């Protein structure tokens, strides 16, 4: 993502450096450059790293896009001089002023901005993966904790009703003090669980892990593709180094004031060898991303394995709790038909236990779902 930073050109300076018949051509060129830079840079910067990369790219592109002013003072032989065609160039001191534009440089400037955009995309992918790795213990916990907390809050009134009923039975001498005290302690533990969950949720939010919408495998593939893309764009810009193509227009003041122009195309034959090396560098980067232990692939694959194992364990625990809840419901139903003196206390105690178990089951189910999704498990 790039900041909007259009190139500005001072028409007054151009007018001073080129003759009127050249002015229109340079004005058109400046407009083209401004349009190219604006279109390439119009976006919102997502990170400090991207701001730095974008600023450096725009700085380099400004030098590549802008024309270069030349002021020369040439001493010619006193007896005159001529070029190979025999054209007399003058004698004595010859002042010159010129303006040059490198068309390959302009194209290279566009490439520099492309590299910055690619690096911003690569860094955004890397940042997401780095956050997930650094806060791996928080993956899936926030929605699971919030679901458990919501359930316990829903049951708060029911818990207080159980305690109040027990106190009324004690006042009516149909229950004992130890039975009432036991329910009070369980209700107090219930309230502490709610407070503890609120603190855990606040801690997870403070650490700031944003759960990725896509599985880690997809994020890893995106990161590696963007890394290779960045390397390819760097190689493309470097492959332009051997080429030079531009024009120079200016005025010379001796022997007469007149305009001159030069069009130049050059190529460094080292480019025949450097292009192949740049291609090898891109291939090596692709292999590095897949094989190096310090790269993301090794860390993400380890994390995916951990998440899937944790999701399986959470599912297994949730299933065991579900079976226990089913047994407890049958046991509680069987107590309703008895005349045991402590029947109501036992039922109240079992109800509190079942609330705690169901809250844990909801936590584990939600945690397993989130971990399996991030780990790419169906």
Image (cartoon, helix red, strand yellow):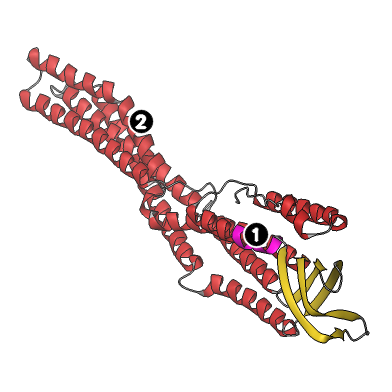
Q: Quadrant of residue 74?
A: bottom right
Q: Answer yes or no: is residue 48 visible.
A: yes
Q: Answer yes or no: is residue 217 visible.
A: no
Taking the magenta stretch, the answer to whether it contains residue 62 is yes
Q: For the magenta stretch, what is the residue range?
A: 58-65
Taking the magenta stretch, the answer to whether it contains residue 52 is no
Q: In the rendered structure, find residue 150 and report the number of the disc placed on it.
A: 2
The residue sitting at 68% across, 64% down in the picture is 64
Residue 40 x, y percent position in the rendering: 68, 53
Mark toward the viewer: 1 or 2: 1
From the viewer's side, name the closer residue of 156 and 129: 129
From the viewer's side, name the closer residue of 271 and 299: 271
**Local crowd at mark 1 within 10 Å, few (<14), some, or many (≥20)?**
some
Circle 1 is placed at which residue position? 62
Measure the C-alpha gap from mark 1 to mark 2. 56 Å
In what element is the residue under mark 1?
helix
């Amino acid at each position: 993502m790039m900041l909007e930073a259009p190139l500005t050109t001072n028409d007054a300076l151009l007018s001073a450096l080129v003759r009127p018949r050249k002015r229109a051509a340079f004005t058109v060129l400046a407009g083209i450059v401004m349009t190219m830079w604006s279109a390439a840079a119009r976006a919102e910067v997502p990170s400090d790293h991207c701001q730095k990369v974008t600023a450096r790219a725009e700085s380099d592109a400004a030098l590549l896009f802008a024309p270069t002013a030349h002021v020369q003072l040439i001493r010619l032989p006193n007896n005159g001089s001529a070029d190979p065609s025999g054209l007399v160039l003058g004698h004595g001191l010859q002042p010159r002023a010129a303006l040059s534009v490198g068309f390959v440089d302009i194209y290279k400037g566009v490439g520099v901005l492309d590299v910055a955009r690619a690096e911003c995309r690569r860094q955004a992918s890397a940042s997401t993966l780095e956050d997930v790795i650094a806060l791996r213990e928080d993956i899936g916990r926030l929605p699971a904790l919030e679901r458990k907390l919501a359930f316990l809050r829903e049951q708060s009134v029911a818990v207080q009703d159980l305690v109040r009923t027990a106190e009324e039975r004690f006042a009516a001498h149909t229950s004992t003090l130890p039975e009432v005290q036991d329910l009070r302690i369980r209700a107090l533990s219930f309230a502490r669980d709610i407070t503890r969950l609120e603190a855990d949720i606040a801690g997870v939010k403070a650490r700031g892990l944003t759960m990725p919408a896509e599985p880690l495998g997809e994020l890893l593939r995106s990161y590696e593709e963007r890394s290779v893309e960045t390397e390819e764009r760097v190689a493309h810009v470097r492959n332009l180094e051997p080429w030079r193509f531009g024009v120079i227009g200016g005025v010379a003041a001796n022997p007469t004031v007149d305009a001159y122009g030069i069009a130049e195309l050059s190529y460094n034959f080292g480019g025949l060898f450097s292009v192949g090396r740049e291609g090898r560098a891109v291939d090596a980067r692709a292999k590095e991303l897949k094989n190096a232990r310090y790269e993301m692939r090794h860390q993400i694959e380890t994390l995916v394995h951990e998440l899937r194992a944790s999701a399986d364990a959470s599912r297994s625990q949730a299933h065991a709790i579900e079976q226990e809840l089913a047994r407890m419901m049958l046991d509680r139903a069987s107590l309703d038909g008895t005349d045991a003196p402590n029947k109501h206390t036992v039922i109240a105690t079992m109800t509190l236990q079942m609330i705690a178990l169901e809250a844990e089951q909801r936590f584990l189910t939600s945690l397993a779902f989130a971990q399996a999704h991030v780990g790419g498990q169906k």
